[in-house]
Amino acid sequence: MKPTQSWGGMKGRESRQEPVYWKQDLHAALLRDTQFLCYGQGRSYGDSCLPSGGTALLMSPLNKLQNFDAQTGLIKAEAGLSFEALLDFIVPHGWFVPVTPGTKYVTLGGAIANDIHGKNHHKRGTIGCHVQELEVLRSNGETITCSPTREAEFFAATVGGLGLTGVITVCTLQLIPIASAFMDAETIKTTGLDDFFTLEDESARDWEYSMSWIDCMAHGKKRGRGIFFRGNHAKNGDPAAEFTEQAKWKVAVPFQAPSWILNRWSIRAFNELYYQQQQTRVKKGRMPLDPFFYPLDKILHWNRMYGQHGLLQYQFVLDSKRQQELTEIFDIIAQSGMGSFLAVLKKFGDIRSPGMLSFPRDGYTLTLDFQNQGPRSEALFKKLDAIVLRAGGRLYPAKDAMMSPELFQSGYPLWREFSRFVDPKFTSQFWQRVSRG
Ligand SMILES: Cc1cc2nc3c(=O)[nH]c(=O)nc-3n(C[C@H](O)[C@H](O)[C@H](O)COP(=O)(O)OP(=O)(O)OC[C@H]3O[C@@H](n4cnc5c(N)ncnc54)[C@H](O)[C@@H]3O)c2cc1C
């Protein structure tokens, strides 16, 4: 049996795996063992999707659509359904998921358990804001049907609840209407963080999606330069016809790259090239859905580029008044020489997240990928953690592999209240680490 694996390359410690095809089969499975965790598509980077023992419930086969209303865009589906399959079905009908992460290889259950956010947080909040109802199976055999108004506390614990409150079996989600399968997009070359701050504020009203790629190796006067992206669903199209036309080819990284391929020079060269490839300040164009939302999905298993020790992602959110701390963080990363290809900066809006442990809240969120260099990475993350802690920010559990209990508990003050709803048979490597003390 190959252990479950997270996107960053960490391994599950389960002794058994149970693919779940039918809701009914879960009852028997839950009686059989003493410890469980659901596993979606393993697109969480660190250890929050990894069992610390017992049974990994493989949720992807539980993926049947139960109901879809093409007039209202309300969809009811089993939680193992992937965004990929969902989009293939809904886009031709003129609907889209209200919130999507940067990959479509996630399940509905995994997305809700992490209360994911997308490039449109300022307009739509998190996925949990659009969930109308959930069915959750507990290890004692009880099914709890919950919603923002029914069993509301349990709902708030389950949305963003890291899979710890039981198995989400079925969910009902409100989709958003689209008139085209194309995006009207703009990319703007920025010269520094001030440019980014202005563009985010300017774009908040008229643009559904926005975020920025930052060259995190650039320092001094070039610090914080990058490419700002924004987009809207195009108007007056034909989603069904346009979606069928859109190319779906993919390439795969065939094997684990040697670790030395990524070093401060290759990363700096990549970032410089990526920044310079845009010749003019502003570029406008019409884009198909996949390259706009899921550019990395085109390269399957791109995580293998980070070598045998895998990658670590670091994502935090800081209050928007903490621009000074944000600048400090960029300086530390540039000095460390351990920069990443992928540094994404976004401003979350003020829509309240529905989950007790939801990550998004008003402020700036920065996401960075790093090659896992063991103690070197740990030392860098400790420095960044100290700033996040001092600034009253928090890290995203879906991306985390190293956060201390102190940082988790200060960032998520409702965690004790949340723990009242944790199913006694459910735990993860992440939860074992951060809920100590
Ligand atoms: C390229 C890339 C880009 C990403 N971009 C974003 C982004 O923009 N925004 C964002 O928020 N995240 C982003 N992510 C993270 C990703 O969206 C989340 O980690 C997502 O939750 C993964 O879904 P999954 O189905 O693979 O779940 P897993 O990673 O397998 O599991 C996630 C959690 O869900 C629980 N779970 C899974 N299924 C169920 C179920 N049926 N019932 C109860 N609990 C369940 C698991 O126990 C675990 O705690 C990105 C990840 C990648 C690889």
Image: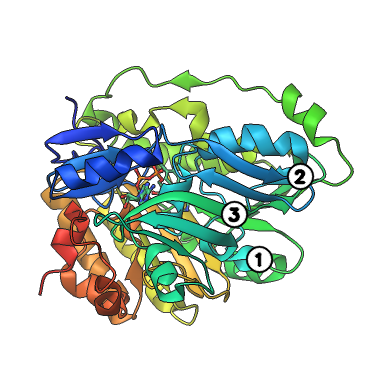
Residue 286 makes an appearance in the image: no
CA separation in Å, label 1 and label 3: 17 Å
- Which comes sooner in the sequence, label 1 or label 3? 1
**Can you tell which of label 1 and label 3 is closer to the viewer?**
3
Cβ(mark 2) to ligand 1 < 8 Å?
no
The answer to whether 37 appears left or right of 299 in the picture is left
Give the answer, above or below, for where 319 lies relative to 337. Answer: below
Residue 367 drawn at (x, y percent)? 41, 56
Is residue 78 positioned above or below 322 on the image? above
Residue that appears at 33% across and 80% down: 392
Helix, strand or loop at disc 3?
Answer: strand
For label 1, the SS is: helix
Instruction: Name the mark on residue 123.
Output: 1
Image-based side of 40 in relation to 274, left or right: left
Q: Give the amino acid at mark 2.
A: Ala
Residue density around tag 2, few if under 14, some if 14–19, many if 20 or more, within 10 Å: some
Q: Residue at x 29, y 79 (%)?
A: 417
Residue 126 in the image, given as x and y percentages of width and height = 53, 62
According to the picture, the residue beneath numbered tag 3 turns out to be 173
Residue 357 in the image, given as x and y percentages of width and height: 36, 69
Numbered tag placed on residue 176 in the rendering = none
Nearer to the camera, 64 or 250: 64
Real-space Cα separation, disc 2 to disc 1, in angstroms: 23 Å
Which amino acid type is shown beneath numbered disc 1?
A: Lys
Query: Which residue matches tag 2?
Result: 70
For image coordinates 25% across by 74% down, the residue present is 420
Marks 3/2: CA distance? 13 Å
Query: Relative to residue 405, is residue 20 depicted above or below?
Result: above
Residue 106 lies, with reference to residue 256, above or below; the image says below
Please rate how many residues cluster around mark 1, counting C-alpha atoms within 10 Å: few if below 14, some from 14 to 19, many from 20: many
